[in-house]
Amino acid sequence: MAHACGFSDDSFAFDPITMALTAIPAFIAVWLRLRTGSLLLPVLLHNFGNSLSFIV
């Protein structure tokens, strides 16, 4: 979640959109891991997200 924090021009910055775009898929992946007991679905979810960012 540290992607949302930055430092430039002698000041700290926080971007809530970046925080949400990182946190929501992470919470879904953790929930899938706990619910199914398998890493397969979280890994597939992560790869799907990477594919979307590559295509768009």
Image (tube, rainbow, N blue to C red):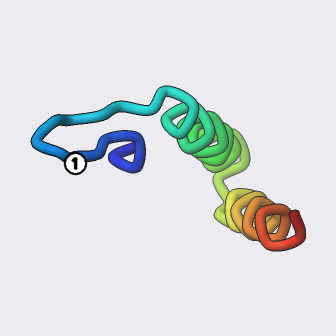
Q: Is residue 20 above or below residue 3?
A: above
Residue 43 lies, in percent from the top left, at: 69, 67
| Location of the C terminus (image quadrant) | bottom right
Of residues 16 and 45, the one drawn nearer to the viewer in this rendering: 16
Residue pointed to by mark 1: 8
The kind of secondary structure element at disc 1 is: strand
| Location of the N terminus (image quadrant) | top left
Quadrant of the image occupied by residue 46: bottom right
Q: Is residue 40 above or below residue 30?
A: below
Q: Residues within 10 Å of mark 1 (few under 14, many from 20)?
A: few
Q: What residue sits 62% from the left and 39% below the top?
A: 21
Q: Is residue 37 above or below residue 51?
A: above
Instruction: Look at label 1 and name its amino acid.
Output: Ser
Q: What residue sits 56% from the left and 44% below the top?
A: 22
**Residue at the far front in the pictured view:** 9
**Residue at the far top in the pictured view:** 16
Residue 36 lies, in percent from the top left, at: 72, 48
Q: What residue sits 22% from the left and 48% below the top?
A: 8
**Residue at the far left in the pictured view:** 10
Of residues 11 and 36, the one drawn nearer to the viewer in this rendering: 11
Residue 34 lies, in percent from the top left, at: 60, 42
Residue 17 lies, in percent from the top left, at: 57, 31
Disc count in the image?
A: 1
Residue 39 is left or right of residue 22, and the answer is right
Q: What residue sits 77% from the left and 63% below the top?
A: 53
